[in-house]
Amino acid sequence: MSSSVTGVIQDLERILLTPAQISTRVTEMAARLNVELAGKVVTVVALMDGGLFFVADLLRGLEIPVRLFTLSASSYQGGTDTSGEVKVNWPANIELRDQDVLLLDDILDTGLTLDIISKRILAEQPASLRTCVLLSKRRQRLRDVPLDDAGFEIDDEFVVGYGMDYQGRFRNLPCIGILNPNKPS
Ligand code: IMP
Ligand code: MG
């Protein structure tokens, strides 16, 4: 890891997933999608900003034609607890009818975000809908979200890095880690 991120890494209590572990798993997920979606054109609906690195890495592993739409959804008000309210920025030009849709997000926590977005996608009458996340927290969901693939199951702890933030910071960490409770100052 480059020395430029060393200072940020000191804000972590521990590293949960190294860049190599993430890369290996994302490559496996892409390989599975290449088999399952062979012969199709995939319409990816990707949730930002947390999904930024996952989506970029996964899509570069896909060998099938891809169309990409990004959505902004936020259920957190800058802290580590969900506000229970999901705000979605639905693009005006999105066209999902009869498409094979792949919904991607960084992390499945309460399920509120993917529940509202997958219902919205299904209302557009796609040919199919697959949902994949990089991380799935082991916890009771507030909504039961059908998941086709999760990169890693993790304990119910707040994680940052590889796109995921705490109060807007730490997205640029190449690893995924647990924040040091005494930091950041
Ligand atoms: P859900 O609606 O509770 O399932 O939350 C999903 C969204 O909350 C994810 O797309 C993330 O943006 C954010 N989120 C949930 N848990 C974490 C976390 O541990 N770290 C950073 N963001 C999180
Ligand atoms: Mg998110």
Image: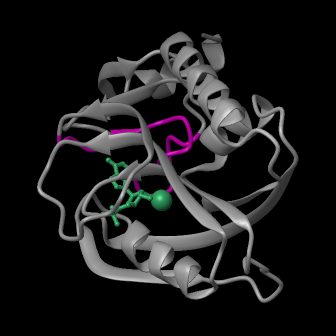
User: Where is residue 103 drawn, in percent x and y?
Assistant: 58, 59
Number of marks present in the image shown: 0
Q: Tell me the quarter of the picture where residue 47 sits.
A: bottom right
- Check the picture and name the quadrant holding the N terminus: top right
Q: Specify whether residue 59 is painted magenta.
A: no
- Above or below, 6 against 99 in this view is above
Give the overall secondary structure of the magenta segment.
loop
User: Where is residue 86 drawn, in percent x and y?
Assistant: 40, 80
Q: Residue furthest right?
A: 65
- Above or below, 164 against 15 in this view is below
Judge from the rendering whether residue 182 lies leftward or rightward of residue 74; answer left or right. left
What span is in magenta?
156-171
Q: Tell me the quarter of the picture where residue 39 sits.
A: top right
User: Where is residue 183 drawn, in percent x and y?
Assistant: 28, 38
Name the residue: 54% across, 52% down. Answer: 50
Q: Tell me the quarter of the picture where residue 55 sits.
A: top right
- Above or below, 14 against 135 in this view is above
- Kindly tell me whether residue 179 is visible in this rendering: no
Q: Specify whether residue 165 is painted magenta.
A: yes
> Depth check: 59 or 77 in front?
59
User: Where is residue 52 drawn, in percent x and y?
Assistant: 65, 48
- Above or below, 167 against 25 in this view is below
Judge from the rendering whether residue 43 lies leftward or rightward of residue 161; answer left or right. right
